[in-house]
Image (spheres, coloured by chain):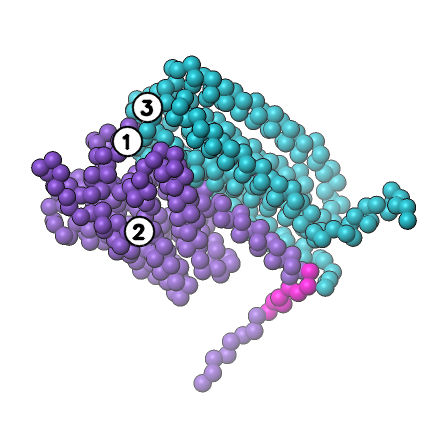
Chain colours: A purple, B cyan
Amino acid sequence: MSVNISKPSFQPYTGEKARISRAFDYLILVLALFLFIGSFHLHFALTVGDWDFWVDWKDRQWWPLVTPLMGITFPAAVQAVLWEKFRLPFGATLCVTALLIGTWVARIFAYHLWNYFPINMVLPATMLPGALVLDVILMLSNSLTVTAIFGGAAFALLFYPSNWPIFGMFHVPVEYGNGQLTVADLFGFEYIRTGMPEYLRIIERGTLRTYGQYATPLSAFCSALLCSLMYTLWWYIGKWFATVRYLNKI
Amino acid sequence: MATTSEQLPVSLESDSKIPWYLQDLPLYLKGFGILTVIYIGLRLYQGAFAVASGLDSSEPAFEQYWMQLFYVELAVIAVFVTSVWGYLWFSRDRNLDQLSPKDEIRRYFTLTMWISIYTFAVYWAGSYFAEQDNSWHQVAIRDTPFTANHIIEFYFNFPLYIILGGSAWLYARTRLPLYAKGISLPLTLAVVGPFMILVSVGFNEWGHTFWFREEFFAAPIHWGFVIGVWFALGVGGILLQAVSRLIELLDMLEEAP
């Protein structure tokens, strides 16, 4: 049995009109790249910020919760426009890639080459695997509900395992001054940060860490729930901002 | 063969390899180049003088190297905003009802270039120099709102992207019929929202008078900047407005090889 697929009613542009259309695409690509590096990076730096800047902030309790929760915002908003209006299935990947470019440039030139923080101390985390899955789920399901529940959850749950190969080595224990700490903690104590007294470092507060090996999965599943809700909220924020209204006065 | 003045424009047009709809491409590329030189120049200046003379605002060297730079920036910004916004306003098109589809398409391309230059400035202000603020304030004592990074980030980068965003808004308002008839909500959101980031500097510095030694980037005192930058998502609406109009305009053009 064959499936009857209706032919598209529009005619593709040819000749000069096709070139005009293509040239406009390229202009938009350049515009979008810098837009999302600039805007998503500022949003991310001022909400996740310290957990992403410093290796000793990358704990089991807050880092896997805060990063995906704040990181799913722009991807959801951009997907709402790129998928709904243009059928382009790469909104999340575009945002996260732009963010990674911005963070890497800043970590190398602003932290390492200016103020001599070791690059291992300021490595950015990645959300790229989660973003790819988020885009694929939206493309295959074409459903906000399915993407919010399964894509949002996957975005959060994939965060810690996809970063473990990068940061695991800094979490090995060392004995220092008759106390036990991690290599990441040692970075934090040895490289003076005048703007960050120890009481500001928000890691593993409360009693979640007494749950032992369950601290990370608990944080990740908490983040999965919140990401599903955050995804939906930001989908609608993206749609609202993509208004095409003209006003008579402001 | 002699070239008369009547023949000159025609021969120039035929020699040009740039398509008519990308007439402003060279200016756009020059804009990128000039901005890149300015931003990298400022970063090199920081690298040369920040540690030597930017750590203590009470030192005479701070006044010489950093406050002098601040005054120069203010002058440059004042001259730039007056000349660019003045040019865009006084050279406005007063016969928009007679605009041909070709000219309107070309102007949509130029508007997109203006917005692209705006987002390039947003990149330097929102991404690179913003994170560098955290890096610098972890090695310096912030004893003034005019630190070696603030002087560039808050008082040059922020005004500059606002001027460029305002230029895009003015270009659309003065040269494109749809934007002249009504005020585009997404374009206004995308320009006014990030403008509020500059206003948030006041709130930020007021807060840091209480926590002047601390640089906790994710703290609520910084969220004014965050809300401002969300409005950059209005670019999605600008894109939709432009695409729907361009489709109409392309339908009015004759087919060409």
The residue closer to the viewer here, A153 or B9, is B9
Is residue A249 visible in the rendered structure shown here? no
Image location of residue A195, percent across then percent down = 29, 29
- Parent chain of label 3: B
- Parent chain of label 1: A
- Residues packed near mark 1 inside 10 Å, few (<14), some (14 to 19) or many (20 plus): many
Label 1 sits on residue: A193
Residue at x 71%, y 57% (from the top left corner): B252
- Name of the residue lying farthest toward the right: B1
Q: In which quarter of the image is the C terminus of chain B?
A: bottom right
Q: Is residue B1 depicted above or below B223 in this figure? A: below
Image location of residue A185, percent across then percent down = 20, 39
Is residue A200 visible in the rendered structure shown here? yes
The residue closer to the viewer here, B219 or B25, is B25
Label 2 sits on residue: A227
What secondary structure is marked by label 2? helix
Is there CB contact under 8 Å for labels 2 and 1? no
Is there CB contact under 8 Å for labels 3 and 2? no
Residue at x 14%, y 52% (from the top left corner): A213
Image location of residue A80, percent across then percent down = 44, 54
Q: Earlier in the sequence, mark 2 or mark 1?
A: 1
Which secondary structure type mostly characterizes the magenta part of the structure?
loop
Q: Is residue B65 left or right of residue B143?
A: right
The residue closer to the viewer here, B196 or A66, is A66
* Badge 3 amino acid: Ile
